[in-house]
């Protein structure tokens, strides 16, 4: 009888797992670098930087990535101006809140209103009657002029809203369609009222 051959050694599963993990990490590293190119656009540049770091959860070394976007030419100035404008609007609104709250707390007193068609009160400055005559004609001309300037904008807003609603899949006459068109109509009615108020003034 011949000699029995020794059984093959058991595979080293630990070493195999470590090799697989190392290979996966190399593939991930290559993917990270290939997926983070520097990009130049008409609006600016996007660039990536990396540095060695330590994962606080595992204590193992990792690569920490940072992305920086630099705006080109006057884009940064334009953004700064827009942010300054928004900040200014917020400051104005914040400053008006106190007066608005005071107005709401003060009871309505109709006796403080001036008579219709009168500017001021007798003995207190200009008292020209604009309820008729040349004053009324001037008021009408002002109202018509302002209204003519507003009409193209309102028509454009109406057409834009209808196009937007159609793109959203809404049909004319549906509840959502009517609600949005009513909202625009209310806004335009307020604008027309403001025209009349300015003409009166």
Image (cartoon, helix red, strand yellow):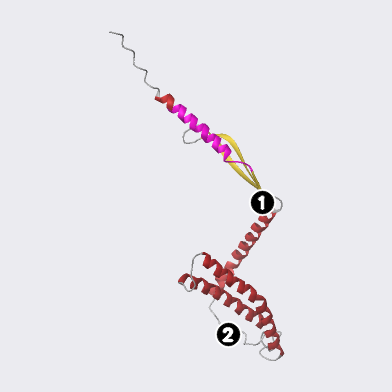
Q: Nearer the viewer, residue 7 or 136?
A: 7
Q: Is residue 4 above or below residue 114?
A: above
Q: Is residue 143 above or below residue 17?
A: below
Location of residue 79 (image quadrant)? bottom right
The single residue placed furthest to the top in the displayed view is 1
Q: Residue at x 68, y 53 (%)?
A: 75
Secondary structure character of the magenta stretch overall = helix
Quarter the N terminus occupies: top left
For the magenta stretch, what is the residue range?
17-38
- Numbered disc 2: secondary structure: helix
Is residue 172 shown in magenta? Answer: no
Q: Nearer the viewer, residue 68 or 166?
A: 166
The single residue placed furthest to the bottom in the displayed view is 133
Rendering coords of residue 25 (x, y %) = 50, 32
Quarter the C terminus occupies: bottom right
Q: Residue at x 57, y 70 (%)?
A: 100
Q: Earlier in the sequence, mark 2 or mark 1?
A: 1
- Numbered disc 1: secondary structure: loop
Q: Nearer the viewer, mark 2 or mark 1?
A: 1
Location of residue 160 (image quadrant)? bottom right
The single residue placed furthest to the front in the displayed view is 1
Please report contact status of discs 2 and 1: CB closer than 8 Å, yes or no.
no
Disc 2 crowd rating (10 Å Cα; few below 14, some 14-19, many 20+) is few
Left/right of residue 189 with respect to residue 23 in the rendered view: right
Q: Residue at x 66, y 51 (%)?
A: 43
- Report whether residue 151 is seen: yes
- The residue pinned by badge 1 equals 43
Rendering coords of residue 70 (x, y %) = 66, 47
Rendering coords of residue 107 (x, y %) = 53, 78
Q: Residue at x 43, y 24 (%)?
A: 15
- The residue pinned by badge 2 equals 111
């Amino acid at each position: 009888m011949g000699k029995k051959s020794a059984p093959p050694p058991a595979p080293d599963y630990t070493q195999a797992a470590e090799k697989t993990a190392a290979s996966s990490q190399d593939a991930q590293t290559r993917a990270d670098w290939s997926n983070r190119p520097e990009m130049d656009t008409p609006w600016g540049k996007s660039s990536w930087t990396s540095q060695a770091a330590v994962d606080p959860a595992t204590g193992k070394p990792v690569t920490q990535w940072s992305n920086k976007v630099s705006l080109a030419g006057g884009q940064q100035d334009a953004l700064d101006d827009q942010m300054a404008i928004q900040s200014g609007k917020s400051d104005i609104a914040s400053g008006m809140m106190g007066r608005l709250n005071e107005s709401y707390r003060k009871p309505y007193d109709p006796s403080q209103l001036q008579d219709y068609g009168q500017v001021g009160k007798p003995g207190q400055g200009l008292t020209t009657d604009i309820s008729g005559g040349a004053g009324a004609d001037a008021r009408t001309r002002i109202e018509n002029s302002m209204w003519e300037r507003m009409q193209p904008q309102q028509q454009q807003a109406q057409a834009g809203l209808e196009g937007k609603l159609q793109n959203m899949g809404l049909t004319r006459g549906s509840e959502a369609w009517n609600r949005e068109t009513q909202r625009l109509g209310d806004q335009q009615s307020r604008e027309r009222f403001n025209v009349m108020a300015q003409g009166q003034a």
